[in-house]
Amino acid sequence: MHPILGQFRRLAMYLLAWIPLAGLLTYLMAATAGLPWRAAIALAFPLCFLYAFVCLSAWYPCRTNFRDHLPPIKFLQAVAIQTVVASVLWNVAAQVWAHALAETDYFPDLLGHLPRITPLLLWTGVFFYLSSVAVFYSMLAEQAAQELEARAMQASVLAREAELKALKAQVNPHFLFNSLNSISALTSSDASKAREMCVLLGDFLRRTLGLGEKTAIPLEEELSLIHAFLAVEKIRFGPRIQMEENIDKDALDVLLPPLLLQPLVENAVAHGVANLVEGGWIHLDAHCQNGNVFIHVENNFDPEAPPRRRGGVGLANVRQRLDARYGERGSFAAKSEQGRFSVAITIPVEREQRTQ
């Protein structure tokens, strides 16, 4: 819905704003074209009222540019075409209205002034339409700034909550319990592995707790956290865990919210590898294309395994954080079919600004 047409109050204020413009056009017609004041008023005010509705169309290329991030040249071309078309249509309407007025007894000489009025209407039509583009673009910029500020505040809150959720939601308590039980069992059978598991578990927890104040980290750092997590899990599951990565080099320095991918890998271990006697595999792919980074996490699972009571907490958290930080610029899709579960994430490419 158009923001002006959607509310009667806005429409009324918008039309009132055109009254000074109609007065300006009246003055220009009288001063530069020699049109009598009465004829200038009769011609200018109805035309401006009509053109006010024509200029509402300037909203759509501005909205499309904000939504689809058009290249500047395409946006300027769209605005230029609409400006010319609107100005020409306005002149056609002026010709029709002038002929209608000339048919009355009050404006018998109006048609004689049309040749001098036409260039004036062309240029003022262009000016009025471009002014509408500027106004609507400013409205969209302000709206986008407000939405960005709201998302930044929400993302900041969620980022701080991530430190606590690392041990509660994202770092599944079952993972901690199982790790501690494994350590307890290993102390009597293989003390060296028990010590190794303690060290690895401590390293992983230290890393997760250090991310509380960070709003974004490079993908390479997130992968390092995943490797620390898998190092602990491999003490428990051994060769039953098979991890395969296909990461483009240009994606390693892309920024993303911390602890975004680790819950997905944890979910793959908890719901996939843990339920498969012969073990399972996890595939992680990431590549950049057209200003976005595409991340895909897939794992196999036992479709006949009973569903777990707790499920989807980590996935829901990932989806919520993506929406808070990126809005419509990011996407999250989960799919389960034929013993395979996959999650596809798309986010815009953001990199750290390096000072020269």
Image: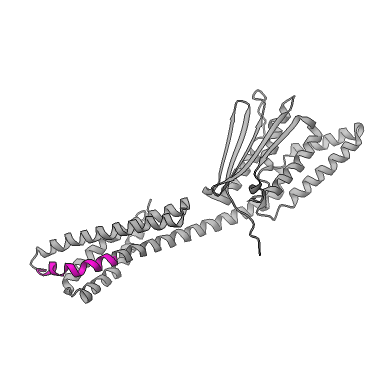
Judged left or right of residue 20, residue 149 is: right
Q: Residue at x 71, y 29 (%)?
A: 280
Q: Is residue 111 magenta?
A: yes
| Furthest residue toward top | 304
In which quadrant of the rendered view does residue 74 lie? bottom left
Judged left or right of residue 40, residue 308 is: right
Q: Is residue 219 above or below residue 340?
A: below
Residue 327: % across, % down: 54, 49
Residue 192 in sight in this render: yes
Q: Is residue 37 above or below residue 185?
A: below
Residue 176 in sight in this render: no
Quadrant, the C terminus: bottom right
The dominant secondary structure in magenta is helix
Q: Is residue 210 magenta?
A: no
Which portion, as a residue range, is magenta?
Answer: 106-124
Q: Is residue 348 above or below residue 42?
A: above
Residue 150: % across, % down: 55, 56
| Furthest residue toward bottom | 31
Q: Residue at x 87, y 35 (%)?
A: 184
In which quadrant of the rendered view does residue 80 lie? bottom left
Residue 339: % across, % down: 63, 26
